[in-house]
Image: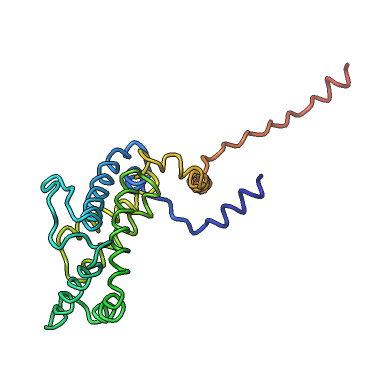
Amino acid sequence: MTVYNRFEIRANRYYVPEPGLARFLFGDTRFAWFWLIVRLYVGYQWLTEGWQKLFGFSINYESFGQPVKGGAWVFNNHTGAAIQSLVNGALTKTSGPFPDVYGWYAWFLQHVVLPNSATFAYIITFGELLVGLTLIVGFLTGIAAFFGVVLNVNYLLVGTVSINPVLVILGSLIMLAWRIAGYYGLDHWLLPLLGTQQLGKRRAKVEAAKTPLPPVEATPEPEFQPVDETRVTSG
């Protein structure tokens, strides 16, 4: 056991312990209620966006049941038309000294996305739905937040601002809090099965091993008492 611990400490000698505040915000289950609120908000935003792209009407509380402009993105005779409109609008924002769309991303839109607009319509629609559902139920929360941020960044690169900057920030924070963001969800049972609890315990052991032990006071040796030879002889 001692040999294993020494090997473990050597293997993790480059690990930097988390500050107490970061450990509380992103790793303490007592703060999981806050990430539940953030997770549900972000998941709701993605679910409503994916829903209207799939069915063509809104489930947002402000416009519940109302048809969306352009209708559904998929499963119709104009699948991909919304993507084409989005891409063509983005390609007009590549000129000027400070373009809204970078040249390299415009090339990607024109040569990859535009010829496969129907495929990307399905990818975006079901991607948004999956991100929203997994965040709401707390299933692999960190991974779901990552793919949500990827979608947000692509929307920003295409020149669409809207709520995307806010979702990028919140999604990034959820990724940092992946250990507890889904604590009130399916991750409460899933993450221990994947071994993340053992990872946390291992790092805790490494931090404890790096903490110096308090000094131990040495026990004074007994002083040598000389023997009285006269008493020994007289006896």
Q: Quadrant of the N terminus?
A: top right
Front residue (pair 77, 230): 77
Does residue 40 appear left or right of residue 92 in this picture? right
Front residue (pair 10, 27): 27
Does residue 130 appear left or right of residue 188 in this picture? left
* Quarter occupied by residue 78: bottom left
Q: How many marks?
A: 0
Q: Which color mode does the image show?
A: rainbow
Image vertical order of residue 6 relative to residue 93, above or below: above
Does residue 201 appear left or right of residue 59 in this picture? right
State the residue at coordinates (51%, 44%): 193
- On the image, the x and y values in percent for residue 234 come to 88, 18
Q: Quadrant of the C terminus?
A: top right
- On the image, the x and y values in percent for residue 212 come to 51, 45
Image vertical order of residue 69 relative to residue 20, above or below: below
Residue positioned most to the top: 235
State the residue at coordinates (15%, 63%): 70
